[in-house]
Amino acid sequence: MIPLGYYIALSAALFIVGVVGVLTLRNAIVIFMSVELMLNSANLALIAFSAYSGDAAGQILVFFVIAVAAAESAVGLAIIIALFRNKLTVNIDEVNVLKW
Amino acid sequence: MNWYDILFYAFALITVVSAAGVVLSRNIVYAAFSLLFTFFGVAALYVLLSADFLAITQILLYVGGVLVLIVFGVMLTNRANKVEVKHGGLTLAPAVLVAGVIAGTLIGVLTTTKWPAASFEPYEETARPLGALLMTQFVLPFELASVLLLVALVGAVIIARREKARRV
């Protein structure tokens, strides 16, 4: 049987990969994919805790995370497309009009 | 080592390797396809944790919804011959610092926490208890989530729509 800590370690590894992606990449869409990786890692941790504590309420929380992630992806990609239409790029280092 | 452990290690490996592929890939289309394998790996791990309904939801919503949206975003924002992903040069040092601090914190928590040794009882089925919980204890967040989805739908359409010349 796999101990709970293994699932949490896997979730932490996924989260770190997502953090590295958000911090180092410059393409807004790939940054967006890295955010999805982090959301998935949090979901994995929640389901692992839910399963090992025998409480289904943790899975409900994952439902809400998935719902909010779907809303976030729709709005986020709409923003990226609007950005591309105005600036003809999705590299965030070339889009610094909000800097100051 | 029984079949459960072997499956766990196999799916964990698939998930982590393809997640690294998302971040390290130079080609944005390859990154999107790596993300597909990550989503499937996470769904398989949900099945191993006996969350069958959420595994199906993961495949339907992430693979069928979010990933398709991402691929549409890739197609709409890139010319076909220019799909390379730029990796940051200037931001590398602070990124390594921040990621290192977060990784250190997580590893510290992982190694110092006393995880309960109890193994879990596989659920009979999860759709029924989840539905009951959603309709009783969590009915208010459920309704709020539906309102949020409606707002996000309208907002996404308004943001992404091409603006027409305003009539005076």
Image (cartoon, coloured by chain):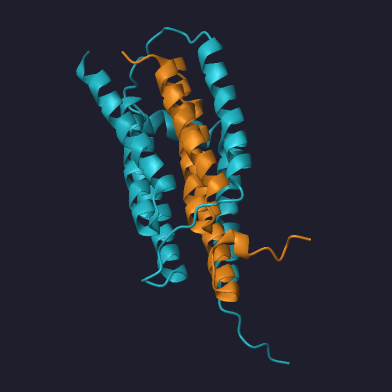
* Residue B124, horizontal then vertical, whole percent: 31, 22
Give the residue at the far right of this rendering. A100
Judging depth in this view, the residue of B15 and B62 nearest the camera is B15
Quadrant of the image occupied by residue B71 = bottom left
Judging depth in this view, the residue of A1 and A58 nearest the camera is A1
Q: Residue at x 32, y 44 (%)?
A: B37
Can the viewer see residue B60?
no
Q: Residue at x 49, y 31 (%)?
A: B133
Q: In this view, does A86 lie above or below B94?
A: below
Quarter the C terminus of chain B occupies: bottom right
* Residue A32, horizontal then vertical, whole percent: 51, 52
* Residue A12, horizontal then vertical, whole percent: 49, 28
Give the residue at the far bottom of this rendering. B168
B6 left or right of A51 in image = left
Judging depth in this view, the residue of A54 and A79 nearest the camera is A79
Can the viewer see residue B31?
yes
Q: Residue at x 74, y 60 (%)?
A: A99
Q: Residue at x 37, y 11 (%)?
A: B119
Chain corresponding to cyan in the figure? B
B37 left or right of B105 in image = left
Quarter the N terminus of chain B occupies: top left
Quadrant of the image occupied by residue B128 = top left
Q: In this view, does B81 lie above or below A36?
A: below
Q: Is residue B64 above or below residue B112?
A: below
Q: Colour of chain A?
A: orange
